[in-house]
Image (cartoon, helix red, strand yellow):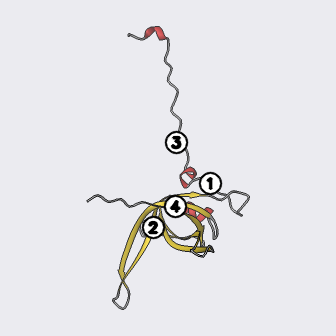
Amino acid sequence: MASYNRVLLMGNLTRNPELRYTPSGTAVSDLGLAVNESFKNKAGEVVEQTCFVDVVVWGRQAETASEYLHKGSPVFVEGRLQLDQWENKEGEKRSKLRVRADRIQFLGTKDSSSTASSPTTEATTPPSPEEPELDNGDDEDVPF
């Protein structure tokens, strides 16, 4: 049976990103995301609902999110669902469903927040050097 695990969410952060590092030095950041929805019920009244989602970000994106995002920042998250399971101190099994972000896009503008923002976290990495232009020389040297 085929399967597909993809999540696309747009919302605002409910708290500042919590950055930490694994023993091997990999950055991990936990984000809280609020996704709002409004609709009309059968009585014609507008109903507002908020879904709170936990998001985990790894690597350079975690560091960038911690540096540029803050509570209230609008973001677009692309990732997949991840089920974490563990036992607490009392031996009870616990689990938590959250989103493991593959990509985070910052939606805020420089004017709307006190910190600078960039279009995507990938844009914060230095660009690769441009390939040199090839000199084709004289077109008459082409053998065909």
Residue corresponding to mark 4: 77
* Residue at x-position 39% and y-position 68%: 82
Element type where label 2 sits in the image: strand
Element type where label 1 sits in the image: loop
Residue corresponding to mark 2: 99
Q: Are marks 2 and 4 in contact (CB under 8 Å)?
A: yes
Element type where label 3 sits in the image: loop
- Give the mark nearer the N terminus: 4 vs 1: 4
Comparing 109 with 131, the one in front is: 109
Q: Amino acid at mark 4?
A: Val
Query: How far apart are the alpha carbons under marks 1 and 2?
Result: 22 Å
Left or right, 79 with reference to 67:
left
* Residue at x-position 52% and y-position 26%: 133
- Give the mark nearer the N terminus: 4 vs 3: 4
Q: Furthest-right residue in view?
A: 111
Q: Nearer the viewer, mark 2 or mark 3?
A: 2
Q: Are marks 3 and 1 in contact (CB under 8 Å)?
A: no
Q: Amino acid at mark 2?
A: Val
* Residue at x-position 38% and y-position 86%: 88
Q: Amino acid at mark 1?
A: Ser
- Give the mark nearer the N terminus: 2 vs 4: 4
Label drawn at residue 118:
1
